[in-house]
Image: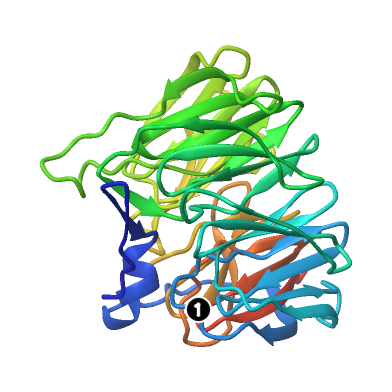
Amino acid sequence: MNARFMSAMGWIAVLAGLVLAGCADKLPLSPLPVIKPTVTAEVNWKSSLGKTDEGFLVPALRDHQLYVASEKGQLTAINPDNGKTIWSLSTGEEFSAGVGVGEHAIFMGNKKGDVLAWIPSGQFLWRTALSSELMVPPQAADGVVVARTADGKIVGLNEADGKVLWTQTRSMPPLVLRGVSGMTLGNGQAAISLPGGKLVQMSLTDGTVLWESMVSNSHGATELERMNDVLGDPLVGSGMVCTVSYQGRAGCFETEHGQLIWSREVDAYGPLVEAGGQLVLSTTKSDVMGLDRITGNVLWKTQSLEGRYLSAPTVTASYVVIGDAEGVLHFLKRENGAEVGRLALDKEPIVQAPLFLGDDRVLVTNRSGTMFAVTSHDNH
């Protein structure tokens, strides 16, 4: 089993998606169920980043430019329509977190704990050293870059020059999942997912904590069983902040004060994604679920892909798209979760949620670092 352990201030970070990223290819997979496909999918272009054992570096799309990075320090901008390189840099860094995007720059974290910024044309902008390695990609809005470090600090930086504006320190549980929490910035605030089942809303101006709520409480006899990190970027909109925790609960909170609107126990593997009035997620059993965003009621549940070690899903204009540990991309109907198409890319596990490129197009990255731009369309 391939796991990355990292010690900092007395805690240990564990590879997110431990089974999928490290040993799913050594375990038996359930056979693919028989379907009657009504969707055709095809690869428009593919490119290679180089082998990525950890899978923490996630491509980002902004202003019709795709930014990708390799662990060995290559940073590249790509035209998402044809896969052609716009510019590429050998930075000499060892990247550990990224790609983050802001209004005027893109951001990476290296293994020394530095935040680095480039403008969209590829010109280096600034470097700021923080107290330890970053856990998730830095993000920016309203001129402020927010970065989370492994020793529990949340730091606000000036997007123009990297100057530290404010710092908050949060307690960390003994064991956390590496690279799974996220943040959503906008309207002068940051909604931040944290280990230990916490969701916090902060002011971008000065880092003031506006409210903090528990998504789920830990349970179990061991530290591993008690892990309940909040997963992914919170979904913010219509007066609600919605999220889900690992081995815990999904829930929506009132935006202004963080009061709980609803919650539901769910053994989530990956973060929530939004599909109209639905919230979609995958579970540790590789079920896929659609929840009503207003009530939390289960609208549909697909169990036919259990034992396929699914990635987290993404949502396109027409489908829920999700990858498995055998390199197969699955297309589910947004309305009821029925599988209506699939595309076998190769035998390498798909370790990240596909990236939505617009319409019915996604970018898929597998464990070997190969990227596939895939388009799907209805056969009727």
Looking at the image, residue 357 lies above or below residue 256: below
Question: Residue 186: percent from the left, percent from the top?
Answer: 74, 32
Going 26% across and 75% down the picture, which residue do you hit?
A: 1
Question: Residue 314: percent from the left, percent from the top?
Answer: 61, 56
Q: Report the number of numbered marks.
A: 1
Query: Tag 1's secondary structure?
Result: loop
Q: Residues within 10 Å of mark 1 (few under 14, many from 20)?
A: some
Going 48% across and 63% down the picture, which residue do you hit?
A: 311
The amino acid type found where label 1 is placed reads Thr
> In this orientation, which residue lies closer to the viewer: 336 or 138?
138
Q: Name the residue beneath numbered marker 1.
A: 52
Looking at the image, residue 270 lies above or below residue 43: above
Residue 194 visible, this orientation: yes
Tell me which corner region of the image, top left, top right, bottom left or bottom right, holds residue 97: bottom right
Quadrant location, the C terminus: bottom right
Looking at the image, residue 54 lies above or below residue 135: below
Q: Locate residue 365 relative to residue 60 in the image: left or right.
A: left
Residue 37 visible, this orientation: no
